Image: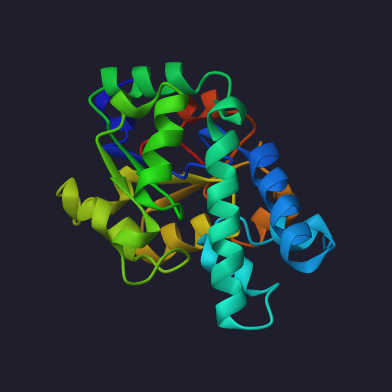
Amino acid sequence: MTSSTRWAAVLFDLDGTLADTEALILRSYRFTMMEHLGEVPPEERFLSTMGRPLPIQIRAFAESDEQSERMRRTYVEYQRTIHDDMVTSFPGAGNVLSTLRGHGTRLAVVTSKATGIARRTLECCGLLGAIDYIICANEVSEPKPHPESVERALTEFALETRRDEVVFVGDSPFDLQAGRAAGVRTAAALWGPFSREVLNLEEPDYHLTDIEDVLGTGPGLAT
């Protein structure tokens, strides 16, 4: 890969992109719903909002803001007890990050998780040391799909005028919307919970069937 085909920076979503957390998320969801509602609404409702901050996801199932906050606390506290045993990186993630760093590419995680749990997830996956910058939902005024978090990463890497040399890899429509709004390239991670048909609506620049496909993309390569 020559310098003209190397990304200046690659931004990754976390859940469903670098970290395989779907089972953890659904188990925490089921526990929370049973505790507060006495039943579990269809999981598809919750999965369809993956990529949004947890408080926004939970609010759709609560009757009031007060109940929503109680549900959020239950979810967070329960997930904390099972997190480390259920989180793993997707196969090849470590190799991809190592290879990109070897090319001089800057790496960021742009996530809707809160800071503490995001860093813990990366640590459990063995990926924390490979990431140059982490921007979480609680660190911005407007989380994804707003472009603020992507813009923060561009500023951190001083790449505001080189947006076509940056790609945002994510498994949700909200990732792709944030990347497009910020003017960077976007890559749909097809190994997450969203279908190709759903992600295609956001017109991503790249379709990746597994994480190692990232290494076959670049600003000087055809989409």
Establish if 18 lies above or below 125: below
Q: Position of residue 13 (x, y in %)?
A: 47, 45
Residue that appears at 47% across and 25% down: 125
Establish if 119 lies above or below 110: above
Say whether residue 187 is left or right of residue 196: left
Camera-side residue of 29 and 200: 29
Camera-side residue of 1 and 108: 108
Q: Is residue 178 visible?
A: yes
Q: Position of residue 147 (x, y in %)?
A: 37, 65
Residue that appears at 47% across and 50% down: 186
- The quadrant where residue 213 appears: top right
Camera-side residue of 76 and 175: 76
Say whether residue 98 is left or right of residue 177: left
Q: Position of residue 134 (x, y in %)?
A: 30, 44
Residue that appears at 72% across and 51% down: 31
Which residue is situated farthest in the bottom direction here? Answer: 64
Establish if 25 lies above or below 121: below
Residue that appears at 46% across and 35% down: 121
Q: Position of residue 11 (x, y in %)?
A: 37, 43
Say whether residue 140 is left or right of residue 181: left
Say whether residue 105 is left or right of residue 216: left
Which residue is situated farthest in the left direction here? Answer: 158
Camera-side residue of 161 and 71: 71
